[in-house]
Amino acid sequence: MTKGYVKKMLSFKILTKEKEMKLLFLELLIKELEIKSFNFKRLPKNIEMKMFSYILLSKELEMTGLNVFSLSKDLD
């Protein structure tokens, strides 16, 4: 295992339950949006706000060394 992989695994394990749930929701939301090829300009405001909050969360997690967008690949 590489040091980066171990660091990501440790970062993932120390997340709070709330952040773990938000992270899982973010991954599912991203996959759903990719599948449906959403046009973000046409999303209702409440969904735009949800996306914005989860994008901020993903940035926060990336700053701790956890890349949200490659997490599923790294954990396989």
Image (cartoon, rainbow, N blue to C red):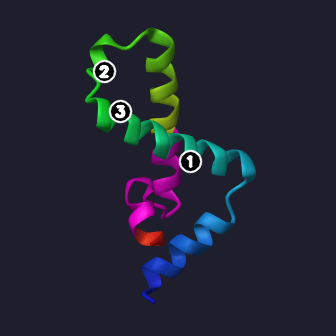
Q: Quadrant of residue 67?
A: bottom left
Give the CA separation, mark 2 to mark 3: 9 Å
Residue shown at the point (38%, 42%) measured from the top left: 31
Residue type, mark 2 in image: Phe
Residue type, mark 3 in image: Leu
Query: Whole-percent x and y of residue 33?
Result: 35, 32
Tag count: 3
Residue farthest to the bottom, as pictured: 1
Q: Is residue 75 above or below residue 58?
A: below
Q: Residues within 10 Å of mark 2 (few under 14, many from 20)?
A: few
Residue pointed to by mark 1:
23
Query: Whole-percent x and y of residue 65?
Result: 48, 64
Q: Quadrant of residue 73?
A: bottom left
Residue shown at the point (44%, 62%) measured from the top left: 72
8 sits left or right of 16 in the view = left
Q: Earlier in the sequence, mark 3 or mark 1?
A: 1
Q: Quick check: marks 2 and 3 in contact, CB under 8 Å?
A: no
Q: Which mark is residue 40?
A: 2
Q: Quadrant of residue 12?
A: bottom right
